[in-house]
Image (spheres, coloured by chain):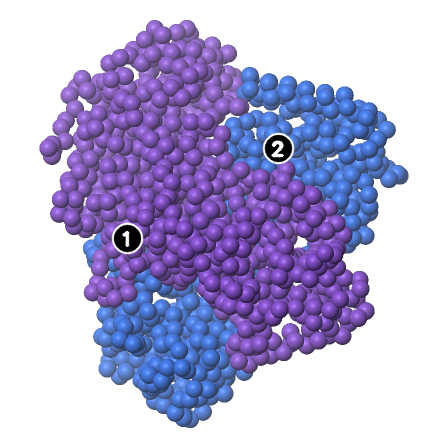
Chain colours: A blue, B purple
Amino acid sequence: MTTQPTQLTQEEISNIDAYWRACNYLAAGMIYLRDNPLLREPLKIEHVKSRLLGHWGSSPGLSFTYIHLNRLINKYDLNAIFLAGPGHGAPGVLGPVYLEGAYSEIYPNKSEDEHGMRQFFKEFSFPGGIGSHCTPETPGSIHEGGELGYSVSHAFGAAYDNPDLIVAVVVGDGESETAPLATSWHSNKFLNPIRDGAVLPILHLNGYKINNPTILSRIPHEELENLFKGYGWTPYFVEGSDPDTMHQAMAVTMEQCVLEIRRIQQEARSSGQPVRPRWPMIVLRSPKGWTGPKEVDGKKVEGFWRAHQVPLGNVRDTPEHFKQLEDWLRSYKPEELFDRDGRLLPELKALAPKGARRMSANPHANGGLLRKALHMPDCREYAAVVTKPGTTTAENTRPLGKFLRDIMSLNMHNFRVFGPDENSSNKLGNVYEVSKKTWLADYLPEDADGGELSPDGRVMEMLSEHTLEGWLEGYLLTGRHGFFSTYEAFVHVIDSMFNQHAKWLAMSKEVAWRAPVSSLNLLITSTVWRQDHNGFTHQDPGFLDVVVNKSPAVTRIYLPPDVNCLLTIANHCLNSTNYINVIVCDKQKHLQFLDMDAAIKHCTKGIGIWGWASNDQGVEPDLVIASAGDIPTKEALAAVVLLRENFPELKIRFINVVDLYKLTPESEHPHGLSDKDFDSLFTLDKPILFNFHGYPWLIHRLAYRRNNHKNLHVRGYKEKGSINTPLELAIQNEIDRFSLVIDAINRVPALRVAGAHVKESMRDMQIECRNYAYEHGTDLPEVDNWVWPY
Amino acid sequence: MTTQPTQLTQEEISNIDAYWRACNYLAAGMIYLRDNPLLREPLKIEHVKSRLLGHWGSSPGLSFTYIHLNRLINKYDLNAIFLAGPGHGAPGVLGPVYLEGAYSEIYPNKSEDEHGMRQFFKEFSFPGGIGSHCTPETPGSIHEGGELGYSVSHAFGAAYDNPDLIVAVVVGDGESETAPLATSWHSNKFLNPIRDGAVLPILHLNGYKINNPTILSRIPHEELENLFKGYGWTPYFVEGSDPDTMHQAMAVTMEQCVLEIRRIQQEARSSGQPVRPRWPMIVLRSPKGWTGPKEVDGKKVEGFWRAHQVPLGNVRDTPEHFKQLEDWLRSYKPEELFDRDGRLLPELKALAPKGARRMSANPHANGGLLRKALHMPDCREYAAVVTKPGTTTAENTRPLGKFLRDIMSLNMHNFRVFGPDENSSNKLGNVYEVSKKTWLADYLPEDADGGELSPDGRVMEMLSEHTLEGWLEGYLLTGRHGFFSTYEAFVHVIDSMFNQHAKWLAMSKEVAWRAPVSSLNLLITSTVWRQDHNGFTHQDPGFLDVVVNKSPAVTRIYLPPDVNCLLTIANHCLNSTNYINVIVCDKQKHLQFLDMDAAIKHCTKGIGIWGWASNDQGVEPDLVIASAGDIPTKEALAAVVLLRENFPELKIRFINVVDLYKLTPESEHPHGLSDKDFDSLFTLDKPILFNFHGYPWLIHRLAYRRNNHKNLHVRGYKEKGSINTPLELAIQNEIDRFSLVIDAINRVPALRVAGAHVKESMRDMQIECRNYAYEHGTDLPEVDNWVWPY
């Protein structure tokens, strides 16, 4: 076995540099050229795109790294994929991807010849074409990088449970300033060298962002080295600008890293001791816009922020720029790189890996190809016994924890559970019976009793929603499965990551060669209505308002009201692909409504009348009461009882909504009810009281086109909260039973006069509840312990 | 001048420990007791709260730090404030705050006696009482800490431009795992030791989160030290559990840090050389739940995660727990700490600072008290000349940059501009004429030409929206002013910070003693409609959907359509207090509509008919066309012209909306129009086409209660985007002029038949635009260069 890296020969340097020149030529060509792609004729104005778009700055460093990895893939038969963290880095990736043939295989009109190259250049950052990030259209990409900060967490997600994989991730020094990137370096405490693959970060210090230097490029070497040693890495430095020297340095350093990775893995795997190694990483310090124009109009460009985007502007109008562009493009000597047809010369082509070893064709980067459906136990076996609706209570999430435990035990190689230090708090702790929390940092004796830690754990807990979400995305995009639970108020921390993943999925669905990946399953728990004691900062059900903005092709929202509904919904979600399933369900004890058969039937429909809670059988109701969510459902049911006690003649229909998109027209979302079905549930003209888990206007946003929208009155959370009891919090936001009775009296014409004294007594009850809570610290027992009486 | 810290005498240790025992007693009392606060009688079940809430774990470490700071405040007459980063840390802060008298001064019913202490205990985490975070009700707090991660950035925000202030910030080791915290350590590259105050972080390694160890407590000492040296700090370690030893170590170490801060400041200030020092910080490693129950039911509690929340549960039902509770509480010997009235003994009281030197009474932590209104130039002086509406173009944000420049030059001590590496990109670069970008990291020669960097800069740029937002919040909460601009799609990165700040402001407005602070002014630019070239990931106007969920008392949204509207809106926002003003305006060249007088008039109303674009004078219109946002307004106006050309008889009213909340009922938001005013604008029954900047359903969410809502048809962004031209992006989302004409024909009965061929020609035009764009890469010139023709 090789243990020492070898120096490159001069010929190897020369070849690798030629290959790199081809990459850089392609990157520059993508930004500038719409014709004359091989510069066979003198450059003319009409060969240049009229709108110059794209980013040159980080491209040379990206392709430099890519092709040095190629060398080692060939030398060691590595199984590797490549993630480009720097913003707008696509030209530096698309170049080598095109050169190794994968691009032309997938997109035959971008063939490996002059015609194909012309198309390849033109479509870049061009209307109807492809973008300047590594979008889903990019072969080999699982990381778009449109929004910065997630490259390292995505890389780790890809490496988990892929023991043979090396995930190379170039990290931009701009990106490194983002919050998510800064904490994701600690992912190394969650990677097991026996079971998992390796992540090889290449921190690309090209020194500048759009208009500013980067922090990490402007601190002393000693601080930089300390920082990464402090993060638990062994940093190796490759610094300079002379290509030949840099090729030699990069080749040796990267080989050193690969050998170190192999040594670490071999030691751990042969000894069975998964101690945390100090994994190698590379710090590549090279000029921004390397090999591009050194100066433009007397201003420094190469090695400065001016190289960030298009280094030479106005080339069609400025003859000096035009001349400089042609000189620059010709400096790569395309005539020495491509044959007469426009094909890369065979001796250069030989440097690229072959077949699926090409990073652009590695199936891990099209994870749906490798995805195997989960082995699933029958969710019915975890059912809560419900003999009579609304009479018993249970913690809604606890049986789900048992279900997840058994899913875990059936899928110990491709399923993980994620949560920010909250799986126990969220009552999912049964999962630890079969798999502990992944932990590769230090252990103390006390961990043995209650720590639930293990290097072999498959439950991922770190107090960073960003890192968890990034890991999970990387894990799913490489063909595996996962389940993420998090506190409702703080899921907003990853709003933007949700947005970006939803966009990735929506775009991927339109890319024919991308195989479907498992859905991202997100359980939102510790919800607003039981954050009475944590107070106002912990009360925010607004993530759903973010979700509904994204493509209906990829978004699903469920609000199971009890244990059995949660189980069947989770079962459904874990079997699905290419969605983001958002499940909202609280962890505390709540009333149970449906037995398992009824739950499956109800959740399959997604919305339905609860006959046992309605008294409109055979007639048109006077009032429709609808609910979505656990406490809102309990309060709505209690309101039904109060109304029936006070107004025995009143005919009430009770509807529960699990699948929130049922409310929206079928033209807007595939789950939307037809107007006919909606009308048959909600009537054409009767008052509707809708008691909703979230902010009330979301229901209006979904249902405003419905025929009976004018009679739809929604209650929900409206930012009224401090330290309270659950009931008092409900009262302040008017989702409580008493407020709903008052609402009903105000809206059902027949009740208005007769109901005046009832309204008074409801208000008295609210005051009594508050007084009791403020005196005793708990809710009035008869209200708190209320059960369905009929 | 003292240059060496001194050791504590045994008497000093004994006193400080007694004070600390009083703090710990209060923290435990808050969690458990509702009566018998001084334990004058044997503890009975009825003295204990029935619902035990609150978090014990980090409290002892917080008060330990607080009172050691107190000692140095007295010794050196320090001007200091205290931020508690650890989650649910309030008991550790409220204790010392109460002991130094500030609490009783503000809340007289929590007096410094037995009666007051009883109230003080009872209200903690009790319905109608106060929370377990340092909420706005907490004297001395500018950092609630409900959502973790922002303590260090808040601390830096407070320190900027406060040269005499020391901001002590305790950072939880759980919190340290969050993304925002991890990058905020780099804030030291943006703090000038001459002009700014000092931040003294105390990283509190108590080892555990809710149910897990923390990463930073489980890495070797050498890695931990490297990490913080790498972040640019000088870490000092105070580690142990024996109180006396720890008092001595903390006293000496903290004094060392204070002396080092003073030395650094003196050297920089006397030399005038603002080089970046390696500021001191403290790593305090102490047991979680320090001094609490060591074991409960045979399980380790002190020094383990079980100490996180309530260390002894079920005390009312479990006699052993009850006994253990009483023993624990009595271990602090309250009878030796408080006099017969329940007042802290005078010799202990003497340890607290006096008056405004108390961290609980420092005016910097009630920044509105110190706030001075900005000196403002006249915004009219920056006006774009508009002689005829809709005929000239300008970059909307550039004049704002000049306005900000001159505001800056008039307020060089209490105003800063914030942006993530984007102020130049956002065309606000004129501000650099008077103040550069703050930069205390290394300089290179090339910075001289285009770097715009200076240690004295007042423009804050780091590629971390989290850090910038945290700095700005800290700056505002300590009584200063700021302006933050950021890319629209990526403002979602700080959704959760927006939510938390909005909650802070809403709560603060109900706290009588909190003086109003400057509004947080957020310019959202590089908006969706000009992200045609950056593609799908950069297209997300959904931040407004997050904003509207928060309290109407603190949220404001403006969509100025042109230069002059933006100027007057910005002028208004910068003069306001206690709001979050969200301004949406793109940076690119757009049509100009209103001269300055008209802009002021229009923006003061917030919504209005543009008579010059309407032809319904004196009659009821057949159609209302409304717009909000720059490109939607241009396209809506172009649609008006197409409709008038094709249907000369058609009477169109054109409405532009700047203040988005005008659309909502006045009962829902103070800016809401009355129904009467709304009806007079939008009619009772005519079709309305609303061309909106954001997701279309937001308009329905605001206006669903309006009389004419059934005729309201909204166009906006609906997740249709890739690489496009601006017009093609508009067409895909149907906000373009041609789509609007088709919409009008479909909705105005009189046009339906006559309009069939017009619809055809509109569709042809859309195809022609697309073909042109896909061929040329730019929009059809006559459409792109369209101006208002009448």
Residue A206 x %, y %? 30, 66
Q: Nearer the viewer, residue B116 or A85?
A: B116
Q: Residues within 10 Å of mark 2 (few under 14, many from 20)?
A: some
Q: Is residue A102 visible?
A: no
Q: Quadrant of the N terminus of chain A?
A: bottom left
Q: Residues within 10 Å of mark 1 (few under 14, many from 20)?
A: many
Circle 1 SS class: loop
For the residues bearing labels 1 and 2, Cβ distance under 8 angstroms: no
Give the amino acid type for the residue marked by disc 1 in the picture.
Gly
Depth-wise, is mark 1 or mark 2 nearer the camera? 1
Query: Residue most toward the right?
Result: A618
Check the image and report above or below for B697 versus B298: below
Check the image and report above or below for A269 versus A715: below
Task: Provide the chain ID for the residue under circle 1.
Answer: B
Residue B237 x %, y %? 22, 37
Give the amino acid type for the residue marked by disc 2 in the picture.
Asn
Q: Residue B389 — which label? A: none
- Horizontal arrangement in the rendering, residue A463 relative to residue A550 (left or right): left
How many labels were placed on the picture?
2
Q: Residue at x 53, y 23 (%)?
A: B127
Task: Provide the chain ID for the residue under circle 2.
Answer: A
Residue B541 x %, y %? 54, 56
Query: Mark 1 highlights which residue?
Result: B457
Q: Nearer the viewer, residue A779 or A398?
A: A779
Q: CA distance from mark 1 to mark 2?
A: 46 Å
Check the image and report above or below for A415 versus A124: above
Query: Mark 2 highlights which residue?
Result: A733
Residue B455 x %, y %? 24, 52
Q: Quadrant of the C terminus of chain A?
A: top right
Quarter where residue A776 is shown: top right
Q: Residue at x 57, y 45 (%)?
A: B548
Q: Nearer the viewer, residue A741 or A751?
A: A751
